[in-house]
Amino acid sequence: MKTTKILPFFLLIVLTLAALFLKNCKGNAIQNDRTLPYSKKINNKTSVGEGKGLNRHPSIIDYSKHARCRMSCRDITEAEVRDILQNGTINYKKSQLQLTECNKKYAVEGYSKDNQHLRIVFAPCNEEVTVVTCIDLGKGWDCDCK
């Protein structure tokens, strides 16, 4: 008699766990599908194809006033920015890819030659890429950038 009272609760727990498992699997599949059109793995690094997503070798790299200020106070050079653009890993959680083509922002992370852990936000549009900001993930800097 007691097992028939417990059975509905047991089934409810099993169904809840199954639903959570399926939701997690489906969420991972959607996330993986979302990255496929933009990137492919080469030597364990994310590389984005030409003409889609982030152009890793743009003909022009522009720098916003804010990015120039952040680079100056954090001792980040243009060569380091180019290196992160070409060899860094896109952090899709920090990127804004749901926007229109010339409004997308890619947060690309990597290490500079002097071992700064950097996140640089790039905004591609056609053959140009604009550096929006530069962040040192390992150290807080006092910058007076507005």
Image: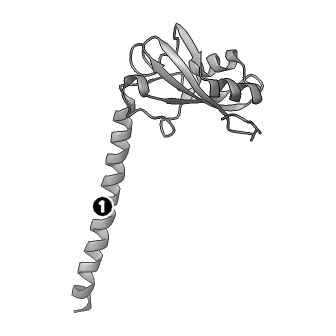
Give the class, few, some or many, for how many residues have Cα within 10 Å of label 1's Cα (few <14, many ≥20): few
Q: Where is residue 99? Give x, y as percent.
A: 38, 32
Q: Where is residue 63? Give x, y as percent.
A: 60, 19
The residue that appears at 25% across and 73% down in the rendered structure is 11
1 is higher (above) or lower (below) than 67: below
| Residue indicated by mark 1 | 18
Q: Where is residue 87? Give x, y as percent.
A: 59, 20
2 is higher (above) or lower (below) than 134: below
- Quadrant in the picture for residue 84: top right
* Foreground of the two, 12 or 101: 101
Secondary element at tag 1:
helix
- The amino acid beneath tag 1 is Ala
Left or right of residue 16, residue 69 in this image: right
The residue that appears at 63% across and 28% down in the rendered structure is 66
The image quadrant where one finds the N terminus is bottom left
Left or right of residue 68, residue 114 in this image: right
The residue that appears at 30% across and 61% down in the rendered structure is 18
Left or right of residue 3, residue 74 in this image: right
Furthest residue toward bottom: 1
- Quadrant in the picture for residue 134: top right
* Foreground of the two, 32 or 129: 129
